[in-house]
């Protein structure tokens, strides 16, 4: 969900990946709010691993700067002029740096304004609309093979495997660039609509039917999980090019969209908005609802909103993590328009539930309050409920709030790591020595994973300290895209994780730059400019007692 009142009905998630064959990532993307609307853009660079990366980054940065400084009454004109300005910026850069001559970038851009969607494109990156379990390509490739398709010399299916498939006829950075092709009429988005912006590294590797299957799985996966699953699918199918995917998703029908639609359309849009919002919740866990209703029905992921006598209960199936004696639920209010609930599931994955009701976090009731003690703290509009280190006896936790004449209940089962043990006086299981700590969930009475701990018993009660550092090894040439993500997961070759929130902001130095949005920090490293082959990047964290995350980048031997 957007952080501002103007675009509360829309949420954007994106990611980019180098793929399996390229040495560097020449794709880049951006999404931002400005005076022209909510803007999403994807660029696919050309001109070698240095020129291509420079082209895509410069194009996105120029487009954002231009749209933030200039307002257009017609968003279609804004798209055209932003691309023209990006083209001029790339041509100017090649004059200043002749070694970049020949660089260019494709571009797809989407602007949401006044509840309508405006789309433009240059080259063969694409925009799809996924609606009601169907997928429609909204842009037309400006490529050699598309020209053959238009002339009916080959079919669309043959074009996907044509040897000259990658030859494009238009791009930002060409002296002869043609203006962006813009859809003549804006689209009126509906609740549940998904607009997918992508480079040909995705559309060329994943068939439309597979894109539809993954992107439309709004109940089974969060928006970010669907983005990453699409990218992994492209990698699995070969990953011959860089892969970039951006999902622009509408949780409800914008109030100004579709005013001239048919009566049937209006009934669909306005008769069931709450049901559509529930289907678009960004699920962070699964829950039981036995507090108020005993019937069980629904899917494997979530069992839906049950309503009875003015009470609505959302049922989940999975559990909140309760490991190492503590866990928490965090609620963030979005200016009276709704709220986000952040939880960590039993697999250690941090997820988000979007509650599309204008609630105040101070009015949310946590139950059962008799079985645990929670520390409540106000953190920049957030409220964090931290379970203490007492053994948790209840099987679930519920969040309850009222809106208008209804009561809404979200209930999360809690899987207690120590459940099934008999607690001793010092809080540890009776059959575990004071110098050992249970570090795995007890799912089988015969299985208990223990870790030797030679610290004093006084130290035993202290929470485990998170290691706030990571080291990445990169090539000596090209560019690397690294990420720091606010989620407790296992690190990968290009991603590090922390359970702390990340400070919003950006920084640019001679050999690296980064942009952080609170949940993800994307770091771009110029491999050849790392000082003496080893450098350090400090990422500020939020709500972490001024702790910072240290990223060390070194050259591969």
Image (cartoon, grey):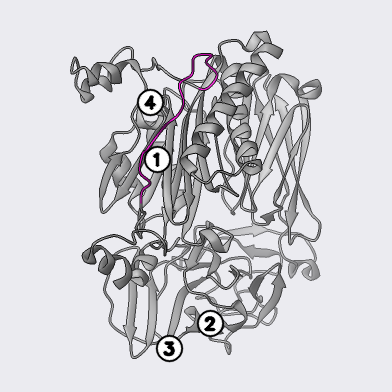
Residue placed most toward the observer, 352 or 493: 352
CA distance for labels 1 and 4:
13 Å
- Is residue 63 left or right of 158 when viewed as pictured? right
Q: Which residue is mark 2?
A: 393
Query: Mark 2 or 3, which is nearer the eye?
Result: 3
- Is residue 533 left or right of 247 when viewed as pictured? right
CA distance for labels 4 and 2:
49 Å
Query: Mark 4 or 2, which is nearer the eye?
Result: 4
Residue 238 image label: 4
Dot 3 or dot 1, earlier in sequence:
1
Q: Which residue is mark 1?
A: 230
Is residue 183 one of those drawn in magenta?
yes
Stretch in magenta: 172-187
Query: Mark 2 or 1, which is nearer the eye?
Result: 1
Q: Residue at x 68, y 78 (%)?
A: 376
Position in image of residue 94 (x %, y %): 64, 14
Overall secondary structure of the magenta section: loop
CA distance for labels 2 and 3:
32 Å
């Amino acid at each position: 969900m957007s952080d501002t009142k103007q675009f509360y009905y829309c949420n954007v998630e994106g990611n980019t990946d180098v793929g399996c064959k390229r040495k560097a990532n020449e794709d880049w993307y951006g999404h931002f709010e400005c005076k022209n609307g909510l803007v999403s853009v994807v660029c696919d660079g050309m001109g070698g691993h240095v020129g291509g990366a420079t082209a895509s980054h410069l194009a996105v940065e120029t487009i954002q700067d231009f749209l933030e400084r200039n307002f257009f009454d017609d968003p279609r004109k804004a798209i055209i002029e932003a691309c023209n300005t990006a083209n001029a910026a790339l041509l100017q850069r090649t004059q200043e740096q002749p070694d970049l001559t020949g660089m260019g970038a494709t571009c797809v851009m989407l602007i949401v304004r006044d509840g309508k969607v405006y789309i433009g494109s240059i080259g063969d990156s694409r925009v799809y609309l996924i609606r009601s379990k169907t997928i429609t390509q909204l842009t037309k490739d400006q490529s050699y093979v598309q020209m053959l398709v238009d002339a009916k010399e080959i079919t669309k299916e043959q074009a996907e495997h044509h040897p000259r498939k990658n030859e494009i006829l238009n791009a930002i950075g060409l002296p002869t660039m043609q203006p962006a092709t813009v859809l003549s009429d804006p689209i009126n988005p509906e609740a549940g609509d998904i607009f997918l912006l992508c480079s040909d590294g995705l559309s060329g590797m994943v068939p439309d039917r597979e894109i539809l299957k993954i992107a439309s799985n709004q109940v089974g996966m969060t928006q970010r999980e669907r983005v990453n699953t699409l990218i992994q699918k492209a990698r699995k199918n070969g990953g011959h090019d860089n892969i970039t995917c951006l999902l622009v998703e509408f949780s409800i029908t914008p109030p100004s969209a579709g005013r001239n639609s048919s009566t049937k359309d209006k009934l669909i849009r306005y008769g069931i908005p709450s049901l559509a919002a529930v289907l678009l919740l960004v699920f962070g866990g699964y829950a039981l609802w036995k507090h108020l209703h005993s019937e069980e029905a629904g899917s494997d992921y979530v069992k839906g909103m049950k309503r009875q006598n003015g009470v609505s209960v959302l049922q989940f199936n999975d559990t909140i993590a309760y490991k190492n004696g503590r866990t928490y639920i965090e609620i963030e209010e979005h200016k009276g328009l709704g709220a986000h609930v952040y939880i960590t599931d039993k697999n250690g994955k941090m997820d988000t539930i979007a509650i599309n009701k204008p609630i105040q976090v101070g009015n949310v009731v946590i139950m059962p309050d008799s079985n645990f003690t929670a520390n409540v703290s106000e953190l920049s509009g957030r409220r964090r409920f931290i379970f203490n280190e007492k053994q948790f006896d209840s099987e679930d936790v519920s969040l309850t709030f009222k809106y208008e004449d209804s009561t809404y209940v979200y209930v999360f089962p809690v899987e207690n790591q120590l459940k099934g043990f008999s607690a001793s006086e010092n809080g540890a299981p009776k059959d575990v020595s004071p110098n050992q700590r249970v570090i795995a969930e007890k799912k089988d009475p015969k299985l208990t994973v223990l870790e030797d701990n030679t610290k004093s018993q006084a130290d035993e009660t202290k929470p485990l300290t998170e290691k706030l550092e990571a080291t990445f090894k990169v090539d000596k040439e090209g560019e690397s895209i690294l990420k720091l993500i606010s989620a407790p997961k296992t690190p990968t070759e290009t991603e590090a994780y922390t359970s702390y929130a990340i400070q919003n902001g950006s920084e640019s130095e001679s050999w690296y730059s980064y942009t952080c949005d609170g949940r993800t920090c994307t770091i771009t490293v110029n491999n050849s400019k790392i000082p003496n082959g080893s450098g350090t990047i400090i990422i500020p964290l939020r709500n972490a007692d001024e702790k910072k995350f240290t990223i060390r980048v070194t050259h591969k031997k």
